[in-house]
Image (cartoon, rainbow, N blue to C red):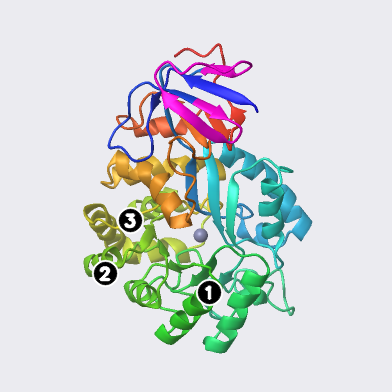
Amino acid sequence: MAATLITGAKVWDGLADGPGERRDVLVEGDRIRRIGTDVEAPQGAEVIDLSGHTLTPGFMDCHTHVTVTPDIVSAFTKSPAAMALWSLPVLRTLLMNGFTTVRDLMCTDVGYGIVDLRDAIEAGLVDGPRMLVAPHLISARGGHGDFSTALAGQYQGSPPPLELAAADGCAEIRTRVRQEVRAGADWIKFGATGGFSSPGDDPGQTTYSQEEMTALVAAAADLGVPATPHCYGDEGARRAVRAGVRSIEHANLASAETLKMIEDSGVFVVPTQYTVIDDARNAFEEHHWKGVPAFKPRKFQKYQKALLDSAENLAASEVKIAFGTDAGMFPHGDNWREFPMMVSNGIAPVRALKAATSVAADLLGLDDLGVIAEGKIADLVAMPGDPFTDIQATGRVDFVMKQGTLHKRPDPGTDR
Ligand SMILES: [Zn+2]
């Protein structure tokens, strides 16, 4: 069995309140076998010296779109094969950034190519983070996931390309949920409210009734699959919690009362602050919106105060925050920037780091991941320095191991 002994790094296990002491970590096969001081390397083991580094569990991004590029029209008009091929460098970038697991919450394929991509990674055909997928965004017609407005120029007179995910009324919603699960979905994603990047709606609008959300989550639960909504507005979040969702994406317009309701119900929030709060802060800065259609800055101007207030309330709450970025809406290589953005919004570094490791694993139901402990799967990343005192260190990951396989190691010549 292949063995690797990692020495010299301070080890943060994903749970403690600060970086731990220097420890040796022995990996055998795909598991962490031993953690201790002066662990002896078995014969033939590779020894990797990570002095000056902090070793953490592999990061998890709970909200990506690996098939989406900032030019969403071009993403949606690729063939299924092109969609998969263009995703390959994206998957590699995410892995090299230290993200060993992602939950992908909507692809641009009218079919289920994203399920094949997930399985290809699992089978070892393709390098990338392990994936959990919600292939499509189930949405009311005219809602956030109805891309027919944005794509009208490409599809004049032909049916909207993502009709597959459009659903109105409980009966049609149940059909869509079952279709997604039968095709291999790990999660169900749905649009509870409007959004900022969709031209035809408003983030404050609620786009499914209570009855519809309850039917959707129940249909998924019957098949053993959790659901998570795209959701900004306050009322949408309240309905989603009542319906029984496991997490809420964004939730950036949730009031203090709603955040309390979310906290009490144990629902996770994936606040995707890197895009949303950056846009809110720059709502009135003309240079920030160069080349962006006018409807978008208008929405951020309208909701600027509510977004910034809600971010402050989230930091003050005890809501279970899981790390997620919406990468794809911006270049995937920047997804680590969610860490410093969370910290700049008042979220403690340890909470941000847990959000991407132990808390994310809890959200995703991955019991063998998200922590560094003997017997767990060896998803390990390391960065020079200490992310607890310098959160920017999360952007300098230079060691990546996924399931015991080494994907990146520091240059031997690098100054420490
Ligand atoms: Zn998204």
Q: How many labels sit on residues? A: 3
* Disc ID at residue 320: 3
What amino acid is found at the position of numbered circle 1 in the picture? Ala
364 relative to 374, above or below: below
Q: x, y percentage for residue 146?
A: 58, 74
Name the residue carrying label 1.
Answer: 220
Q: Residues within 10 Å of mark 3 (few under 14, many from 20)?
A: many
Please state the extent of the stretch shown in magenta in the rendering: 26-48
Name the residue carrying label 2.
Answer: 261
Q: Can you say which quadrant of the picture contains the C terminus?
A: top left
Residue at 38 percent across and 56 percent down: it is: 271
Q: Viewer-nearest of labels 1 and 3?
A: 1
Report the front residue among 248 and 51: 51
Report the front residue among 272 and 152: 272
Q: Is residue 330 left or right of residue 52?
A: right
Any atom of ligand 1 within 8 Å of the CB at mark 2? no
Q: Is residue 271 left or right of residue 185?
A: left
Q: Is residue 28 magenta?
A: yes
Measured in 3D between alpha carbons, the distance from the residue under mark 3 to the one under mark 2, in whole angstroms, is 12 Å
